[in-house]
Image (spheres, grey):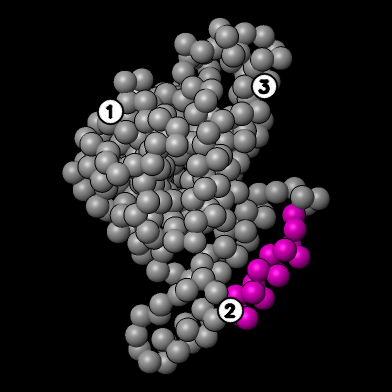
């Protein structure tokens, strides 16, 4: 899929497009004229798009990216704020839509990758930070900017950034509201890999396929195990984790992994 043109996309919602390239499912933020800034309909549509890919048995990895040449996502569409965040009640309702969108990525049972080029600012950066893995081109710019707008940032949003980057990294991004380049973002843990601009999509696809070749039962169990330490003691469900671990050992994929190891070949996992 080229950065300049997006074809063969399912236009369920014109502002968030899907492209199916099994085992990869692409979610494309599609408002390039607005630098892919999120409007309210996008916040509401994103969980539905995640769910659709999560329920598709042919999709093993989900990649989120922005359309066009200039941005992954330039945050929330501020032009809507006078209507949708005009007072505490409407701001709370808007925040609920935000939180559902963020949770849909963080709680997704399938591995997720944010593929970032250009501006990744505000809500766009928050979306990227919800993905399991973030990769970016060298032209990427990152910032989280509530301090420049005077708005209150949700505790759950701050908590997630702290979990991903640690307190020091979170303080730096939030308190400075500064734009940082890809190399600095790598140092802070915002992203895990940096590519040349022309290599970003190929590199991301290669990474996604590498993940997709691994055992789905194991990936789901690992994702759930990694999530648990970030939850409060009362919210942790270690019983569910143990059940997922047991399911790995009783799966056909486990037997395939053992056979492939003994036969010195690459395993072919069927998610069963």
Query: Which residues, given as a range, are shown in magenta?
Result: 236-250
**Which residue in the protein does label 3 denote?**
93
Mark earlier in primary sequence (2, 3): 3
Main SS category, magenta section: helix
Q: Which residue is found at the position 63% from the left and 61% from the top?
A: 225
Identify the mark at residue 54; answer none if there is no mark. Answer: none
Q: Earlier in the sequence, mark 2 or mark 1?
A: 1
Q: Can you say whether 57 is above or below 137 in the image? A: below
- Can you say whether 38 is above or below 140 in the image? above
Where does the image place residue 3, in percent across and percent down from the top left? Answer: 24, 38
What crowding class fits label 1: few (fewer than 14 Cα within 10 Å), some (14-19), or many (20 or more)?
many
Q: Which mark is residue 70?
A: 1
The answer to whether residue 31 is left or right of residue 249 is: left
CA separation in Å, label 2 and label 1: 44 Å
| 238 falls in the magenta region | yes
| Mark identifier at residue 251 | 2
Q: Residue at x 18, y 44 (%)?
A: 198
For discs 3 and 1, the disc positioned in front in the rendered view? 3
């Amino acid at each position: 899929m080229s950065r300049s043109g997006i074809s063969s996309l399912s236009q369920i919602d014109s502002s968030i497009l899907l492209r199916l390239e099994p085992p990869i499912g692409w979610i494309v933020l599609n408002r390039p004229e607005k630098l892919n800034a999120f409007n309210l309909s996008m916040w509401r549509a994103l969980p539905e798009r995640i769910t659709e890919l999560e329920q598709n048995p042919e999709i093993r990895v989900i990649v989120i990216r922005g359309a066009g040449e200039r941005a992954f996502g330039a945050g929330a569409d501020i032009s809507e704020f006078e209507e949708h965040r005009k007072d505490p009640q409407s701001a709370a309702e808007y925040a609920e839509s935000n939180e559902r969108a963020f949770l849909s990525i963080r709680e997704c049972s399938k591995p997720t990758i944010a593929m970032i080029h250009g501006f990744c600012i505000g809500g766009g950066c928050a979306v990227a930070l919800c993905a399991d893995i973030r990769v970016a081109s060298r032209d990427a710019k990152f910032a989280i900017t509530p301090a420049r707008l005077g708005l209150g940032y949700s505790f759950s949003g701050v908590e997630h950034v702290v979990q991903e980057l640690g307190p020091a990294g979170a303080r730096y991004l939030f308190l400075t509201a500064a734009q940082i380049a890809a190399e600095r973002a790598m140092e802070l843990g915002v992203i895990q890999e940096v590519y040349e601009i022309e290599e970003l999509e190929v590199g991301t696809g290669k990474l996604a396929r590498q993940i997709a070749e691994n055992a789905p039962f194991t990936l789901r169990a690992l994702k759930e195990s990694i999530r648990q330490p970030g939850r409060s003691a009362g919210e942790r469900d270690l019983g569910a984790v143990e059940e997922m671990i047991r399911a790995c050992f009783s799966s056909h994929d486990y037997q395939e992994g053992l056979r492939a190891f003994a036969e010195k070949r690459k395993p072919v996992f069927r998610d069963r």
